[in-house]
Image (cartoon, grey):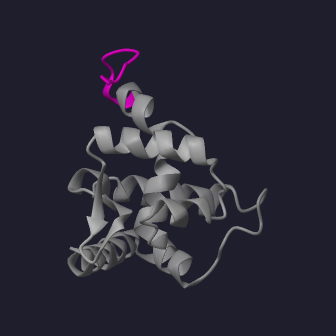
């Protein structure tokens, strides 16, 4: 199904795809939390409804942000993996997390404040590199 865009603005066009409540959450779950099966996503803290999850995973696949495949040793379980296009969203996730840490903590004081956030505060590039390195290592093991 071809994607509808509101206008020709690159910013608005990106938001037409990624501005949805769930799209970047799903990418974040894959990149940071290692989610890769439908069951993994349904058991997450964000509690996405299964019908919405199914729709969003299909759209992410159609857009080339993720690929659906199966484990080599278990053809019954579908795996959802980020493509290079999906991994290219890492800097956006890093900037969103940085903004949230800086500007939302006063109204949402229970936002995570662990080692990863400390690294994010002091070296965003290292944080992004660490996320990408871990994900690519995982891909090597899965494929």
Where 99 sits versus 123, above or below? Answer: above
Q: Position of residue 13 (x, y in %)?
A: 36, 27
Q: Position of residue 21 (x, y in %)?
A: 58, 41
Instruction: Read off the magenta span.
Output: 1-11
Where 60 sits versus 72, above or below? Answer: above
Q: Position of residue 59 (x, y in %)?
A: 39, 38
**Residue 7 visible, this orientation:** yes
Where 83 sits versus 40, above or below? Answer: above
* Residue at the image point whose x is 59% and y is 59% from the top: 42
* Residue at the image point whose x is 26% and y is 44% from the top: 64
- Work out which quarter of the rendered image holds the C terminus and state it: bottom left
Q: Residue furthest top?
A: 7
Q: How many marks?
A: 0
- Work out which quarter of the rendered image holds the N terminus and state it: top left
Seen from the viewer's position, the closer of residues 134 and 101 is 134
Q: Is residue 4 magenta?
A: yes
Q: Position of residue 74 (x, y in %)?
A: 32, 73
């Amino acid at each position: 199904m071809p994607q509808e865009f509101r206008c020709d603005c690159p910013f608005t066009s990106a938001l037409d795809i990624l501005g949805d409540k769930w799209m970047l959450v799903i990418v974040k779950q894959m990149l940071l939390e290692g989610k890769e099966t439908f069951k993994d996503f349904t058991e997450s803290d964000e509690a996405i409804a299964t019908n919405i999850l199914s729709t969003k995973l299909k759209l992410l696949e159609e857009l080339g942000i993720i690929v659906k495949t199966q484990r080599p040793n278990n053809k019954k379980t579908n795996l959802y993996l980020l493509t290079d296009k999906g991994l290219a969203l890492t800097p956006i996730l890093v900037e969103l997390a940085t903004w949230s840490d800086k500007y939302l903590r006063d109204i949402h004081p229970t936002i995570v404040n662990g080692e990863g956030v400390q690294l994010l505060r002091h070296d965003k590039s290292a944080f992004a590199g660490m996320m990408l390195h871990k994900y690519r290592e995982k891909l090597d093991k899965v494929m």
